[in-house]
Amino acid sequence: MVKSIKNQSLSKVALENSSYSLILNLILKFGGLIFTVLIARILMPELFGIYSLALSVVTIVITFTDLGLDNTFLRYFSDALGKRNKPQARTYFKYLLKIKTLLIALFIIIIVFSAKFISYSIYDKPLLFFALIFSCLFIVMESLTSFFGGIIVATKNIKSLPILALLNQIMKILLSLLAISLVKYEFKVPGLFIAFAISGGIYLLLLFLIAYRKDKDSLIGPTVDIDKKSVNNYLKFMAIASLSLTFFGSIDILMLGKFVAVEYLGYYRAALSLIITIASLFSLSSIFLPVFTQISGKRFSRGFHKTLRYILILSIPATAGIIFIAKYVIKAVYGNEYILGTASIYFLSLLIITTPLIGLYSIIFQSKEKPKIVSSAVLTSLIVNVILNVLVIFLFRRNPLYMIAGVGLATSLSRVFLLGLLVYRAKREFNFKVRGIGLRAPIFATIIMSLFLVLFNHIVDMNIFFGAIEIILGVVIYFVVLILVKGIKKEDFELIKNAFKRKQV
């Protein structure tokens, strides 16, 4: 049975789900990073560049099969369950699933008929053609998985997701390695997408069975009348935001693919994957949408500010740390072949702070049925991103290394601009202020940690062993200083303590 959140402790609900979400994020992101590292090392920069370009195109297509449906479904399905209105919940499920299915069919047809034009006429990269054709199977599985995953998230009972994600990551890696070993050079990237589709299909089946077993009454049964106009209006603005965000995340590689050799795409993709993995560890946006949807007033404001503070306490030192150890991390993770991606990491490091904060502010607006604010802010920032990318490509058209570093800077600056827009609108709409959340202590602790990292790098001949020691010592020094200057309060220790206790929501 789905319980209402109104009479529950926000901290307890958020903590329990956040602890499972953290485990899920660790599995997904580090599993994804391990996969990316293995594939990058096996394919080498040229084929890895083709894979990166194909994946960027596929990501755009998957977004068109979504058009904000996943977030819209999560928002309205969560709201109906919070009101214990299962007939309404299953009506939202059936209505939005029907739209989702039609979109998948439409855009699969489009990608099949446009694959040759994209590969030969736009990018002049023949190896891209079969990668796009075979990616269609993956697109179907990924699109449906993201939708059905929302059912489990909406119930705020995500205990089963980490083990499913772990199983999926293992299958994905094993099947991908098998595919690469069995096929010829030109079919290695298409083979990857076939492996993705098989592992994704198994994952989708398990997700559906779990969701059906937990609460089949919310999925199966007669429908009722719903306010489709309200849903469609919300969906309209979420579609704009979803498309803009995806282009936001892929536009750099899509634009670079026209102007640099594929190995430079590989360098950039390696750097971006590493940064996105770190940044995503601090993002809990999908977990907080059901929570923020069902609370208001002072609890809403208090929950927002508490979440904001914890994100900054973790992301500020992470951003500083990666700058000092970027070169060593690239060498240790991807190998010397990708060392040219180091410069991009320096500029992309800002994403470690901005990505989870953008996610948090976006969820605030979505939970209160104000997606128009998010969509307009993202679209404006996307335009800024494209303009900056064009400027960088023009300035460094004869130097591809400077070009990928400059595009990294353009990406980071456009995200800062987006965050600024969302902060400004949150202040106007909800009177949210970012002052008074206690950032002096984290910043001071980060400075002390950074001084240690500089000294350590200067006196130690770095290798993988000393690199691991440096990271561990840096983390310890940061939190010791943070505690000494009282940057962590008694209530924070209580929350951490409660995070290790199992609580029934």
Image (cartoon, rainbow, N blue to C red):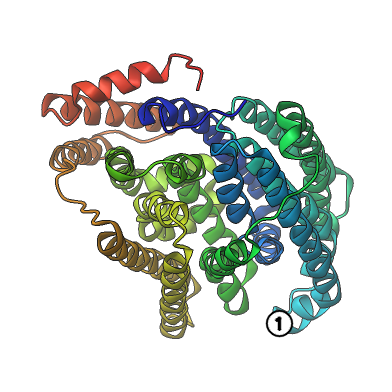
Query: Which one is nearer the viewer's eye here, 21 or 297?
Result: 297
Count of all numbered marks drawn on residues in the image: 1
Q: In this orientation, does residue 315 appear?
A: no
Q: Position of residue 87 (x, y in %)?
A: 70, 42
Quarter assignment of residue 495:
top left
Q: Name the amino acid, label 1.
A: Ile
Quarter assignment of residue 294:
top left
Q: Residue at x 86, y 76 (%)?
A: 113
Quarter assignment of residue 308:
top left
Query: Which one is nearer the viewer's eye here, 494 or 340?
Result: 494
Classify 187 as above or below 218: below
Classify 485 as above or below 374: above
Q: In this orientation, does residue 139 appear?
A: yes
Relative placement, left or right, of 356 versus 431 is right
Relative placement, left or right, of 110 versus 502 is right
As drawn, the residue found furthest toward the front would be: 225
In the rendered image, the quadrant that contains the N terminus is: top right
Q: Residue at x 67, y 38 (%)?
A: 86
